[in-house]
Image: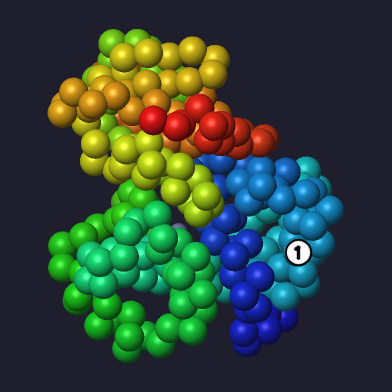
Amino acid sequence: MATEQATVAEEEYLQTLFWLQEAKLPMTGANVARAMQLSAPTVHEMIGRLERDGYITRAKDKQISFTANGLVHAEGVVRRHRLIERFLTDVLGIPWDEVHEEAERLEHAMSPVLEERMLAAIGDAKTCPHGHPIVAGSRIDGVPLADVAEGAAVTILRFENEAEDLLHYLKDAGIEPGLKGTLTATSDDEVTVTGEDGDTRTITFSVAETVSVLADPSPPSRIALPEQLVLARERYGR
Ligand SMILES: [Zn+2]
Ligand SMILES: [Zn+2]
């Protein structure tokens, strides 16, 4: 039986599972571990708890599925998370690389009335400041920036991983959702996008795997899930 209230930790995992489903990636413990950059044993324990508490089921092949209750719960916490982030950036003026962890704290305690008020306050915005749709099901398919060929036109769609140190890194590099430009250089180490303003923005290949873009010409559709994110900050001193 499902408990009345999911714990904060359980809600974090439900969000990650929801993102995997949204991105059409297999819902497995291994993918949760990669997405959250956590160890397999840690994830294994929490997946067991989610199953006992009635939020998910596990098939013989380890594929995870939401129960009806689990899906409602996951969708709700994801929607509140993205809404809060948008509210914090647009209404309170907090930089977009500083809102993820604030939202993690607030999303568990929000009443439906407050949610309605916040939704009204953000106006026409349809995504969180990192490009994820607030209303489930409206995700635009993209490709990893890392897959794009030199010379292609790109529009940054979304940051698939919202770890706050990663967001700081992307902000420092000048990469943000909505940015349009051309992929001007790519190697096994780094990817460079030149914006329409003529400024170049370089990030590690590993980080570029977590940045979803629209590209023309476009590589085949894919969502990358790197085992370990490499943020080579020292290459960033400008
Ligand atoms: Zn976030
Ligand atoms: Zn976000």
- Taking depth in this image into account, of 149 and 63 the one nearest to the observer is 149
Q: Is residue 119 left or right of residue 14?
A: left
Q: Amino acid at mark 1?
A: Met
Residue 147: x and y in percent read: 45, 20
Which quadrant would the C terminus be assigned to in this image? top left
Foreground residue among 32 and 22:
32
Q: Is residue 59 visible?
A: no
Q: Quadrant of the N terminus?
A: bottom right
Q: Residue furthest front?
A: 238
Side of 238 relative to 2 (left or right): left
Above or below, 205 against 66 in this view is above
Q: Residue at x 39, y 26 (%)?
A: 202
Picture quadrant where residue 54 is located:
bottom right
Percent x, y of residue 117: 25, 83
Q: 146 or 124, which lies in front? A: 146
Q: Is residue 197 above or below residue 9?
A: above
Q: Quadrant of residue 214?
A: top left
Which residue lies at the image location 29% right of the left edge and 43% below the top edge?
177
Q: In the image, is residue 35 above or below residue 189?
A: below
The residue pinned by badge 1 equals: 46
Q: Is residue 121 above or below residue 221?
A: below
| Image coords of residue 223 (percent x, y) | 50, 33
> Residue 130, image x and y in percent?
36, 50
Q: Residue at x 32, y 38 (%)?
A: 174
Q: How many marks?
A: 1
**SS at mark 1?**
helix
**Is residue 112 at least partly visible in the picture?**
yes
Q: Residues within 10 Å of mark 1 (few under 14, many from 20)?
A: some
